[in-house]
Amino acid sequence: MAKTQAYYVQFWTQVLQYFVGLYHRLQKCWAAVKGFCTKKEEEYIPPAESIFHKEKIMMLGNILTDNSLALEQRAQAAYRIGLLAFTGGPTAGNFAGEYMKEVAHLLKDHEMVPKIKILLLQSVASWCYLNPVSQKRAKHLHFIPILVDLFDDKLESTMKSETNSSLLVKFWGCYVLSVMTCNNLPCMQELKHCSSLKYHLEILASENWSGWPENFAEVLYFLIGFHRH
């Protein structure tokens, strides 16, 4: 068992080093390409009319920010904004970012059932997936402490269904943080300084992640570099 764990740690360390190296090589390549571009081209911002899904995102954004509506309806709108941000490309992701501060506000300041909270987490995951600009903006909106706080939630209920729902929220929290942290050193560094996170990830990694493509508590644990300490 110890040999298997050691091999697993070595494997993920090599994978992480490979992607970090690839990331830095791509950065150098992009810097070289940018050198051939004029300042005017660097500062070009696509007009609003060229933003894919713009009208749909605006319509859903009005629902998300409408305080008179039920939380579940607003969360459904956030979920759909996240999907449109992902399928619409970088410009749609940037445009959708205007509404993500409302998602941060809902997660931080509102009590809600797990089902609604998961919809909001899924919206953030879709918005940030493979989008460095959205990842940076999510960090600026303080999503990291909001997500880490999910792991401190202690459920006192003895009902299995409620316990499973609470655990599922934490699983989604792990996934969103993994998406935000992928190839994002500032996020890794901030998470590394979260005092209780290492302990929470160790506990969550021991849970049953069947049905998920990966154990994202373990993935996040290795991305942050906790296995080195």
Image (cartoon, rainbow, N blue to C red):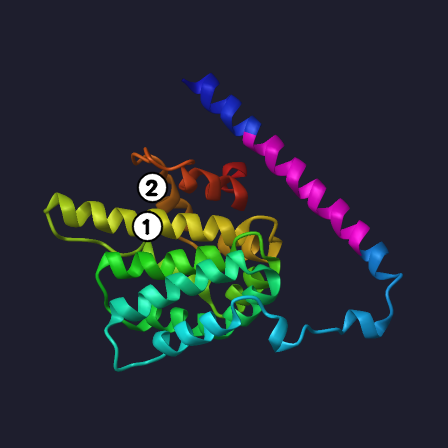
Q: Is residue 96 found left or right of 197 in the rendered image?
A: right
Q: Secondary structure at mark 1?
A: helix
Q: Residue at x 27, y 69 (%)?
A: 73
Q: Is residue 148 visible?
A: no
Disc 2 marks a residue whose amino acid type is: Leu
- Determine which residue is flagged by label 2: 204
Magenta run includes residue 150: no
| Image position, residue 211 (x, y; %) | 33, 35
Tag 2 or tag 1, which sits nearer the N-term?
Answer: 1
Q: Residue at x 24, y 57 (%)?
A: 114
Q: Secondary structure at mark 2?
A: helix
Number of on-image labels: 2
Q: Is residue 98 found left or right of 170 in the rendered image?
A: right
Spatial CA span between label 1 and label 2: 8 Å
Q: Which residues are magenta?
A: 12-30
206 relative to 27, above or below: above
108 relative to 115, above or below: below
Q: Quadrant of residue 135?
A: bottom right
Disc 1 marks a residue whose amino acid type is: Lys
Question: Within 10 Å of the Cα at label 2, are there few (<14), some (14-19), or many (20+) other Cα atoms?
Answer: some
Tag 1 and tag 2, C-beta contact below 8 Å: yes
| Viewer-side residue, 181 vs 59 | 59
Question: Within 10 Å of the Cα at label 1, are there few (<14), some (14-19), or many (20+) other Cα atoms?
Answer: many
| Numbered circle sitting on residue 38 | none
Quick one: which residue is furthest to the left in this view? Answer: 158
| Image position, residue 110 (x, y; %) | 27, 71
93 relative to 125, above or below: below
Q: Is residue 186 found left or right of 147 in the rendered image?
A: right
| Image position, residue 99 (x, y; %) | 45, 73
- Determine which residue is flagged by label 1: 170
Q: Residue at x 47, y 44 (%)?
A: 220
Q: Is residue 25 visible?
A: yes
